[in-house]
Amino acid sequence: MTHPESAALRALIDDRYGDLAARCRAAGVPLHDDAGVAERIRRTLLASDFAFDVWCRQPQLLAPAGLERLRSGSDASARIEALKLPHDEAACMVALRRFRHAEALRLVFRDVNGLDELPETLSATSVLYEVLLEVVLGWSERALAARYGYSRNHDGALQRLLVIGFGKLGGSELNFSSDIDLVFAYPQAGQTDGPRPLDNSEYFIRLGRQLVRLLNEPTMDGICARVDLRLRPFGNAGRLALSFAAMEQYYQSEGRDWERYAWIKARPVAGDRAAGKQLQELLRPFVYRKYLDYTAFAGLREMKALIDAEVARKDLADNLKLGPGGIREIEFIVQLTQLIRGGREPSLRVRGLLSALTACEARGHINTARARMLREAYVLLRRVENRVQMLRDAQTHDIPADALSRERIALSLDYPDWDSLHAALVKQRAVVSEEFAAVLMPQGGRAARVPAADLVLWQRACDESLDAATLEASGFAPGDELADALLKLPQAAAVRAMSARSRERLDHLMPQLFDAARVTAVPVASLLRLCRLMQAVARRSSYLALLEEQPAARRRLVRLFADSAFLAERVIAQPLLLDDVLDPRIDQLPFKRADITAEIARVLGTLEEREAEAELDRINEFKASTAFRLGLALNDGRADAVATARRLAALAESVIGAVLALAERELVAQHGRLPGTDMQPGSGFSVLGYGSLGGEELGFASDLDLVFVYDSRRAQAMSNGARPIEGSRWYQRLAQRVMNWLTVLTRGGRLYEVDTRLRPDGSKGLLVSSLDAFVAYQQSRAWTWEHQALLRARPVAGDTVLNAELAGVRRDILAVPRERATVLAEVSSMRARWRVERDRSDERQFDLKQGHGGLLDIEFALQGLVLAHAAEQPGLLGVTANAGLIEACRAAGLLDSNQSAILGVAHADLLQRALACTLDLRPRIAPRDAELEQLCGSVREVTDALGFAFD
């Protein structure tokens, strides 16, 4: 959209356009000023004095061929081959500067005429300086070669300088007149091979100086690039180029937080790029820590304080880059997330701001609304910044003070006037300032006032003068056990070994935990658990930083430790779960098995090396995190019990599948594969889930009832590896490995407890059965209760073909006609026996699972109905979950609507109560109340009416 210009601006453009036409005539350059060309030239003149100056110096760029170059969508790399640098240094500088001016003019021309969007402009600007660096490095190497030769390591291998780009250049988002932040490095020590050999250290310093001089030294044509080398180790006091070993040593021993932020965007931009990747791998642990790193807040706060001091000293409040709500604050918000989480999530290790923001949004770390606001603000600020610099090719981030320049910038950005653009800037900067303040210093965070009385309590704990009476007077009664725990905490070995900074965090945090725990329903229990957590994380300052910096996480943690003993114990055992307390990302939870399986694959794909122990640790961490977030959702009332139990079962299935794949991979590496058949090319191994897993009603602490079955046709086959074994032994070892890896205790905990006693012949039988043996047992020797168990069984992992066969076998076995009266009698007998042996109900309490009218009464009744009627109603066998079976029995006419409604409500309610008991680390026993008695009484009435004698 074109807006009218002021008379002064119109006169300026007319005069300059006429001047260019005259220069073209004088130089014999044809200027075909048809309407389209003239309009674009005039718009470029509106936006840029620099463009006018370049056209004056190089009028041939207004010829048809020149204009075609300016319109070209190809970046500078497409034309760099045509740049032939003379051997003479002065002539080389002239050629470099003329090339840079012409390419920079192309960037202005395309940007102001709407031929490129902002990302294309920033990327093309970065490419321009990359290709200039590459050709200048090549020229410099040749210039030094005559005297010194080329660099070699001690083995005689040729070496090149590595030029690392930082900041906007590293992020491929360079603004128009930016300086370029560079660091020089080289792989190894050695010397040059020329007539006057130089040590590599001295050679690469001279080479770096030559490169900088060619780009940075002012001539009558200006400069080619402003080079800034202050980001190198030790800054201006450091050597111009360092070996990789020296770089690694520096960052391990001297590296500061701000340098971690700087290295996020660093990448090789010229020279030995392959070696550059090696250097980045060496330094990755310095930039991205192995665990979630909330200590990054401290570094960010220090950098921001320095910037604010500079802004105040130089009066830079309106500075587009450094001022409040400016570009740097947006970068800090995104980079903070990258530093905290990038060690565990490689997808966040991206360099460009917009790409990094998108990655943070995709992983749920910056929500969509915030990401959109930050993106809009960033694009506006960068567009204005670019136009400010394009105006006069000046390295500035300040908007000009004169009205004419402001009008030119506004009109070039399609705003009607400066006031409209200024209002948009003020609005966006206010949004950024608010977001940044919330991230840097959230209300109640590190700057929060510590309650004086609670500070005294903690000080008394530290000097061993705290007693139970003092705690009780402060709201923590009874105080004996808590006083003992608080007195022991400062004396714990892990606390005494803390660094000064970590101890400062603990001393700041503990009084706030007192204050928060006091207002919970169970202040003593909550604070006791928090004391154990503090001892568990004492050696990990990042977790203390999380709780100190993030008041929302702290409040949520204290509430959680009061509400759920089970979830609290999980956090104490695995402090990594603190991240889930801060941000449960329920909307990011994968609920379906396919989604969970894909997420496990993604998580394993982030590992640098695929090694069994590391993969098991990562699977364990994923399982713990997902189950924990499901627990939070249930605890907070955002998910019901039936959905939670189903999702826990889907999680277990995916974990079993991942562990099976890992076990098979390791077994194949040792013994090779077993030959398949035309009909069954897979592994020929299947895992059946029974019980709560098969019935999709898994609890948070449930064990897994598993049965392993293999393809009978491969029992005698030999594997094809270096150490071949017979098929039956191959499958036995596979099952043993799966069992071991599901139950082994790793750094991440134990995945599951596993029970395999439901296999044929129970604990006396083989761990893994052939399909033939499994079928024979079920058909001829299995008891009715084993067929009841088979009703809830389903394949959960393994060979898809064998799984289908097993599902068919299950249907055939369960669909055998049975006498209803016999089935009901046997099911009732087994239920009565279990109640005698296992029911913990009494006059005051009710066993939610085993009690009369409880969960097992519902389950046994459904199983009895299905066994009695599956022959004529085979559709009943397609469901294993109790909630689904209730509906299936109603649809088959085995339950009337009232009965199915009663069982459905009772099942959901009892399951909810049972899971709540688990979350509070209580047995699944509830106090008898009128509601519970009525519920269970209704269940008893239904089972009695159906013909079961469960009492």
Image (tube, helix red, strand yellow):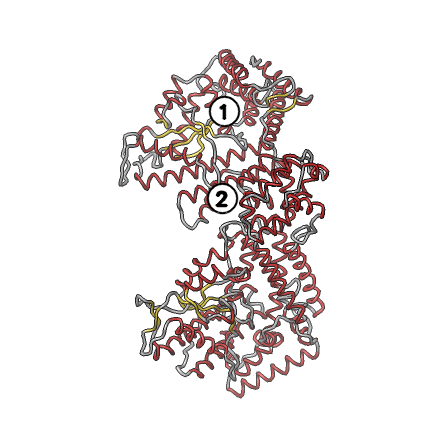
Q: Residue at x 40, y 37 (%)?
A: 660
Which one is nearer the viewer's eye here, 177 or 744? 744
Which one is nearer the viewer's eye here, 237 or 791? 237
Q: Quadrant of residue 18?
A: bottom right
Q: Residue at x 61, y 52 (%)?
A: 504
Q: Which residue is mark 2?
A: 599
Mark 1 crowd level (few <14, some 14–19, many ≥20, 10 Å Cα) = some
Q: Are marks 1 and 2 in contact (CB under 8 Å)?
A: no
> Is tag 1's residue or tag 2's residue first in the polypeptide sequence?
2
Up the image or down, 101 lies above or below 598; here it is below
Inspect this view and state whether residue 464 appears: yes
Q: Which residue is mark 1?
A: 875
What SS does tag 2 mark? Answer: helix
Residue type, label 1: Gly
Which one is nearer the viewer's eye here, 419 or 202? 202
Up the image or down, 654 lies above or below 769; here it is below
